[in-house]
Amino acid sequence: MGRRKVLVVGALGVIGRAIVEHLAARPDTWEVVGVSRRAPDFETRAEFVSMDLRDARGCREALSPHADASHIVYAALYEKPQLARGWLEPDHVEVNRAMLRHLLDGVSHGSLEHVTLMQGAKAYGGHLGRPVPLPSRERARRVDHNNFYFAQEDELVERAKREGFEWSVLRPQVVCGVAVGSAMNVVAGIGAYAVLSRERGLPLVHPGHPHTLTECTDARLLASAVEWVATTPGCHGETYNVTNGDLLSWRDAWSRIAEHFGMEVGAPAPRDLAEEMPHLAPLWREIARREGLRVDSLDGLIGLSWQYADLIWANSSAPARPGLLSSIKIRRSGFHDCMDSEDALLELLERMQSQGYLPQ
């Protein structure tokens, strides 16, 4: 097969940015077009198209030069100001469904071969406060509730059947990567929290429940999985969980994070970061100006990620059962990439420092 043309939609998010970087590093194989509302603030071979996916007409016009795309990776996301509450609201589902529809309307289905749709662990209903199977497997029946994942998937499957292209769905868990202003960027949250604590002469205190366990998915590993499902016919029409392959104890990882920033570790003390951290925006601006950082607004760097950090660190009460995903299906199908989650987290913090988003 010759060179493919891929639209990476949501190209500046935690997932999309890693996919752009991964595929653009293969110019003989991929012509990469990033789709986002903002222009990239990093050097890339990819072409970028600016559009608002909520605007149907604007999408058609912006995509007209790229209607010949052979592949789409859909990682765009509409979130409401109250992150977790918004997940259950009907208009959250409808806006996200419409965004995907507008994107698909803007490409030529004579050229389109495959669409990769991003979902996540919310597909299993853990955010509803109900027990979920442990681990959660792709064969599980849908939990009946408002969820834009299902609305988008139904739209995609129906159109693929009608218009003759293939699809795959990926479900990562706590995605870690480099991004700015994302709704769910735990790396930026950890980095900014550590820097602001260090600036005030405080130890690095784990702000969540001391016994929270999770899995993570490095965005770079996820980008490899995206290329794999897009180019492996046996994966088409399938849904796969994708994780690094290990478990992460946030409390146990904290000592390595503290060492990375040259700090002492304090006793765990649950706190509400979404409430506390925005008050430190003036201090962040001082640090950013002194250190010459690329983003001098704390909100501009973090987006809604303080809320996300509070959710994944479980704040004052750990869930009765951790939300864990089985990655057996994807490994049996032939994708074997894995990462040490602690090592990957530190590598990503170093990347955000070397790229000027966080101070050394």
Image (tube, rainbow, N blue to C red):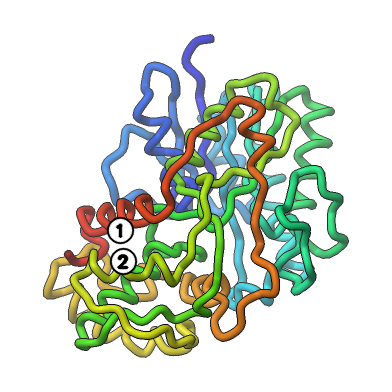
Q: Residues within 10 Å of mark 2 (few under 14, many from 20)?
A: many
- Return the disc, 1 or 2, that comes first in the chain's sequence: 2
Quarter placement of the C terminus: bottom left
Residue 156 visible at all: yes
What is the x, y in percent for residue 136? 73, 52
Vertical comparison of 339 with 135: above or below: above
Determine the residue located farthest toward the top in the rendered image. 1
Residue under circle 2? 257
In-front residue for pair 339/360: 339
Vertical comparison of 118 with 193: above or below: above
Pointer 1 with pointer 2, Cβ within 8 A: yes
What is the x, y in percent for residue 349? 30, 58
Question: Label 2 is placed on what type of residue?
Answer: Ile
What is the x, y in percent for residue 316? 56, 86
The part of the image, by quadrant, that contains residue 240 is top right
Q: Residue at x 66, y 51 (%)?
A: 325
Vertical comparison of 240 with 84: above or below: above
In-front residue for pair 145/143: 143
| Left or right relative to 224: residue 77 | right
Q: Residues within 10 Å of mark 1 (few under 14, many from 20)?
A: many
What is the x, y in percent for residue 305? 47, 70
Question: Label 1 is placed on what type of residue?
Answer: Leu
Residue under circle 1? 349
User: Which-is-in-front pick, marks 1 and 2?
Assistant: 2
In-front residue for pair 33/332: 332
Which structural element holds mark 2?
helix
The label number, if any, that marks residue 167 in the structure image: none
Q: CA distance from mark 1 to mark 2?
A: 9 Å
Vertical comparison of 331 with 155: above or below: above
Q: Residue at x 60, y 25 (%)?
A: 334
Q: Residue at x 65, y 33 (%)?
A: 115
Which structural element holds mark 1?
helix
